[in-house]
Amino acid sequence: MRKIRILWTDDEVEVLRPHIYFLEEKGYEIDTCSNGNDTVDLVRQNSYDLIFLDEHMPGLSGIETLRLIREVRTDIPVVMITKSEEEDLMEAAIGSEIADYLIKPVKPKQILLVIKKILDQKRLVTEKTTTDYRQEFSRIGSMISSAVTWNDWTDIYRKITFWESELEKSSDPGMAGILKTQENEANNSFSKFISGNYLSWLDRNSTNAPVISPALFTKKIFPFISPGRPLFFILIDNMRYDQWKTISAELTGLYRIVDEDMYFSILPTATQYSRNAIFSGLMPAQIADLMPQYWIEDDDEAGKNNFEEELFRNQLARKGLKYKWSYYKISNSIEGKKLNERIRQLLENDINIIVYNFVDILSHARTEVGVIRDLADDETAYRSLVRSWFVHSSLFELLKILTSHLVKVIFSTDHGTIRVQNPVKIIGDKRTSANLRYKAGRNLDYNPSDVFELKNPEKALLPKTNISSRYIFARNKDFLVYQNNFNYYAGYYRNTYQHGGISMQEMMLPVACLDPVS
């Protein structure tokens, strides 16, 4: 095994000989240097894992040497060592992207701790994370087996999402694999829970139902509207809870979360159903009955969400609410930048609703575009792409602009998505819906044990185009494929991100209220 090689530059390097002997006894290989120019030459000629660099040296200073080192190698961690505690010097060093900063005199064990923190961090994090998850594994398993309420399931999903994030920091693929197995177990049990409880949630007299799509504005948004303080409701289409946690981490220092909760998407967990239900405050069958001009059937090629503004206006009228409001749908950066230019106008409203479509576009692009599929090869990469979009987006720019104003921001979504694995064979006619996670139609043939079926859509307050119409939903990581060219389509869609069915990722959704950090 190759020894870790360290370069230590100090004009009084002989004084540090006891420190160097101490580190060599610990198994490190130490090269020394007494000036900046020679340091840069050594970096050109050798491969170092870490550099200790004195700030006060004759000739080139430590900061000047560091800049030259960065021209040669940008990846070597550099620890600055100095006698000075001046704030501007510290800021200059930190601004130069050093790995750490030490004040003389330094002790051997202090140096050793820095080495371990920088070079052994991955191993130490892996060991601790693995140990901690092993301790939690049985507890999560017990939570899954004993879950009986929707609150139990939100707790489980939060736990699994937390450990998914933690194990990303680990280099132990075995633990991540075990978590995936546990997540699969949870989704199987969650699907059974939804099959047994979903219809009861739609009963007006139910006292054990979670907040679902039609109640989102009433329960989670309207209560936060206050006179003289604009509210911005940001709906990111197709955003999962884990993706929200990735985005919210980027808001640290700009916003503080004053309330974070989950609500449940209705079935199907697809934009046509869930988002129309959000803006109307009604279930899909109620929209189709009361406002048929705004409901587009599954087999119609017209856009399914072209009337959100009209549906929201109707919801306000039914509830007798007289807010001053705006609605915008953002599908590209140009539209986003134009919206940001209207900030003064937006600040005059009680509530501004902005729908951002990027995550949904990314999900569909990953299915159809090879390079996107490669970039989002797994859940970690998918989250990374979402984060990259967010930090470079017009939405992030808008949020930074809003921090200087007295506003409140609520983030949410209409449904999530899941990476499908298991094809389930079905038969349907030409009018059967095309979605891979649910099917709606009258001539469906399938194995009832493979799906959650609704033979009477009216019980789920879903529209039906024919007296014999029914809905079926894929569970966990299943996806529904017609028997014609089954093998081709099963291979093509396997490992793509889909929505419309039953899973924790599709149904349990974040809703978070934020205040700017003053």
Image (spheres, rainbow, N blue to C red):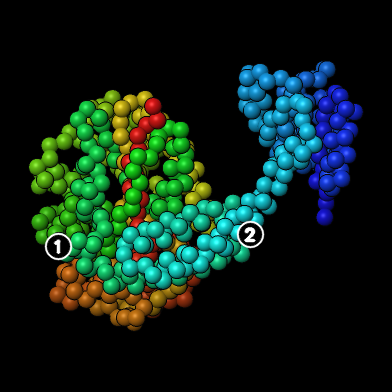
Q: Is residue 301 visible?
A: no
Using the image as rendered, state which of residue 458 and residue 175 is in the foreground: 175
Quadrant in the picture for residue 173? bottom right
Percent position of residue 136, x then y:
52, 61
* Residue 205: assigned label: 1
* Horizontal side of residue 72 vs 168, given as left or right: right
Vertical placement of residue 71 versus 291, above or below: above
* Residue 265: assigned label: none
Using the image as rendered, state which of residue 302 and residue 396 is in the foreground: 396
The residue to which callout 2 is attached is: 172
Kind of residue sitting beneath label 2 = Asp
Q: Give me the residue at 55% from left, 62% from top.
A: 135
Percent position of residue 134, x then y:
57, 63
Q: Give me the residue at 33% from left, 41% from top.
A: 513
Q: Is residue 294 visible?
A: yes
Q: Give me the residue at 37% from left, 62% from top.
A: 153
Percent position of residue 217, x then y:
22, 47
